[in-house]
Image: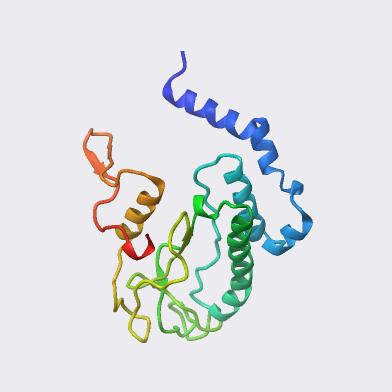
């Protein structure tokens, strides 16, 4: 008799080894010109693969773009990363629209915090410029999130910071507001709670409300 963990492992194995999964992961089936549009790099091809997985029935896909921790050499990091992100994200939205999928697929581009409004001295705790050119450090006071598709109203900016990008100014939003909005699009009850190992309920979202401007 299988225990729960064994059943989940078996389901996961069958999911990734089945015929539909093999076809979805075979990115060589895509038009080479479309692959070029997404970008012939791991980020672009991962985003294209995400679209293929959604077409195959996957409900949630995460593409992890590492390497943004630009405590030094910030300019060089952005010059390397931003063109790749621009190609991948813009191509994804265009691709989903052309395939009639955009209203049914919610796209989020985000990290877990922002970067300091001011550049540091490039020392990262050592002498100035000892690590390279100046960078930007972690900043939890303000950040930006790109969200689109899923039937949301696009083409708008919700909220703002002060002129230096230090703190929220107009329409400040918190993580819970974003979570409520995602839950609304996905049809998930925002009052859903999960039981921890002690049997105590942990709320799925413990603050915030739906961002009405997007609906």
Q: Does residue 164 appear to the left or right of 169 in the view shown?
A: right
What residue is shown at x 35% (from left), y 65% (from top)?
213
Residue placed farthest to the top in the image? 1
Count of marks, rendered view: 0
What residue is shown at x 40% (from left), y 81% (from top)?
117
Q: Position of residue 20 (x, y in %)?
A: 65, 34
Q: Does residue 213 appear to the left or right of 191 in the view shown?
A: right
Q: Position of residue 151 (x, y in %)?
A: 45, 55
Which sits in the foreground, 122 or 190?
190
What residue is shown at x 58% (from left), y 32% (from top)?
15
Residue placed farthest to the left in the image? 200
> Where 83 falls versus 202 (above or below)?
below
Which image quarter is the C terminus in?
Answer: bottom left
Q: Position of residue 71 (x, y in %)?
A: 48, 75
Q: Does residue 151 appear to the left or right of 52 in the view shown?
A: left
Q: Position of residue 83 (x, y in %)?
A: 63, 72
Which sits in the foreground, 13 or 125?
13
What's the colour scheme? rainbow
């Amino acid at each position: 008799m299988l225990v729960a963990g064994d059943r989940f492992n078996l389901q996961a194995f069958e999911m990734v080894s089945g015929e539909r999964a093999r076809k979805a992961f075979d990115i060589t089936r895509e038009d080479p010109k479309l692959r070029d549009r997404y970008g012939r790099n791991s980020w672009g091809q991962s985003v294209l693969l995400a679209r293929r997985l959604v077409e195959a029935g996957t409900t949630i896909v995460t593409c992890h773009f590492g390497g943004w921790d630009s405590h030094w050499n910030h300019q060089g990091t952005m010059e390397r990363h931003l063109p790749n992100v621009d190609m991948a994200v813009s191509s994804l939205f265009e691709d989903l629209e052309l395939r009639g999928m955009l209203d049914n697929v919610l796209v989020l581009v985000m990290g877990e915090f922002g970067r300091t409004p001011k550049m540091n001295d490039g020392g990262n705790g050592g002498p100035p410029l000892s690590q390279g050119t100046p960078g930007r450090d972690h900043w939890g006071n303000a950040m930006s999130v790109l969200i689109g598709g899923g039937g949301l109203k696009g083409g708008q900016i919700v909220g703002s910071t002060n002129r230096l990008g230090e703190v929220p100014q107009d329409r400040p939003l918190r993580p819970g507001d974003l979570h409520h909005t995602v839950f609304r699009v996905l049809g998930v009850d925002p009052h859903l709670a999960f039981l921890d190992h002690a049997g105590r309920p942990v709320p799925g979202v413990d603050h915030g409300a739906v961002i009405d401007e997007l609906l």
